[in-house]
Amino acid sequence: MILSIYEHRSELPVSVDKAFAWHERTGAFERLAPPWRVPKVLERSGLIADGSEVTVAVPLGPFRTRWTVRHFDYEINRRFRDRQVRGPFAKWVHTHGFEAIDDRRCRITDHIEYAVPLGGVGRVLGGRMIRRMLQRDTAYRHRTIADDLALHGRFADRPRLTVAITGASGLIGQGLSALLSTGGHRVIRLVRHPPTAADESQWDPACGLIDAGAMAPVDAVVHLAGENIATGRWTQRKMRAIRESRVDATRALVASFDRLPRRPRVMITASAMGYYASDSRKPLDETGGPGTGFLAEVSREWEKAAMSAADAGVRVVPMRIGLVLTPRGGALQKMLPPAQMGLGGMLGRGDRYMSWISHDDTIGGIYHALMDDRLSGPVNLVGPMPATANEFIATLGRVLGRPVLGWMPKTLGRAALGGMAHEVLEASYRIHPGRLLGADYGFRHANLEACLRHVLGRVGPDGG
């Protein structure tokens, strides 16, 4: 067996106990999973204490392979380790090390000892690929840890919250749940089915069902649930489902607050940049008027339903969300296959504006709105630097190392994008996040290229 060693170190501007505590909390595993290769958790017992195990299905080319690791050698504020029990490596031992520099700084180290199957042959065939994978993964994780701790640090003097989330199984909901949990907050996931986990509580907007007992300690509600607008054609049936799942469900949720022992202090609700006119050329902040058409109409009614909670003293923040960039879903996931083949034409007219935002800034902006009492009323949840379609596809091609050589017919683009075809192919949204910037939110990814490199793991001159 030929053993290889890889190590990655970073300094963090927090005490060692804060850095270690972050790793001990529910959600750390999810926050550290690279979005370009997300493992599916199959079984889990415990977190990082000795004897804890996790079994995941990890992507390996077009296939997935099962990988089980068990934690050992836990020492608080010093280290925890995991070793492979079953999986793709001949050997795998990962040491997560923590070292205090002073009271306000620490050093974290990922030290990995591994051996690939087939000895020297396996090392020749796959050694470079695995080392590159480790470089990309650990760099992503260390950036995420540093950015998350910085965000939590801004509100360290505020009480920890109990937050109920609808749509917690979606891309935004999953990420927000993990971000909140690692910050020491308690998350209650509102689900339509009978609860199957300790952190779940049942609600059904169709019949007004909500568990008042489980909701009693709730300080805040984040309402993300709604029919997916990005899938399928917008038939009359689809549009009715979109409206009911947003407008009617929001009304029912707000009405249910009257049956709780106490109302939540704040309600964050998803809205859409589709609230605005879809041909904007000049930057629009939150004072911009509404547009016309189905999505604008739904967004207006959606926000009106949410804002009714303000009459009862709840701080309500509708978040007008832009194009959320992650390879795990949404527009970017659908753009990647043609972009990797050098086709960019699915982005339609090249001078249109696309108001994008990274997934991390989406959940970071929601977190900031939860914690910052200065924010009330509509907030544009978009990045500060919208790009034209030409700029977007050129940047994506540069990040992928695949220059755009041809154009995809719009008909194929519509087929690929489904319900979001109008947003990606035709609409022009040049939206400005005025209120977030006014509340001193610090964007992790203000620059499109930096965002794409981060979410695709292409950071660095060699793309590693």
Image (cartoon, rainbow, N blue to C red):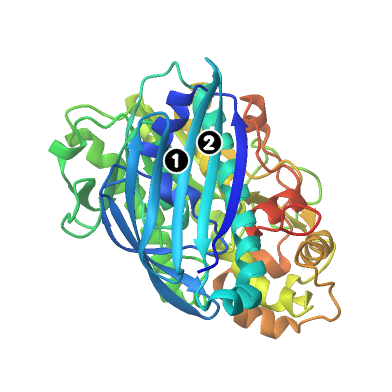
Amino acid under disc 2: Asp
Q: Is residue 224 left or right of residue 254?
A: right
What residue lies at 20% left-to-right and 52% top-to-bottom? 197
Examine the rendering and report whether any part of residue 419 can be seen.
yes
Decide: few, some or many residues near mark 2? Use Cα within 10 Å; few <14, some 14-19, many ≥20: many
CA–CA distance in space, label 1 to label 2: 7 Å
The answer to whether 415 is drawn above or below residue 365 in the figure is below
In terms of depth relative to the viewer, which is nearer, 126 or 377? 126
Decide: few, some or many residues near mark 1? Use Cα within 10 Å; few <14, some 14-19, many ≥20: many
Label 1 close to label 2 by CB (< 8 Å)? yes
Where does the image place residue 386, in percent across and percent down from the top left? 75, 49
On residue 148, the disc is 2
Where does the image place residue 42, in percent across and percent down from the top left? 31, 65
Amino acid under disc 1: Leu
What residue lies at 42% left-to-right and 60% top-to-bottom? 243
Where does the image place residue 407, in percent across and percent down from the top left? 81, 80
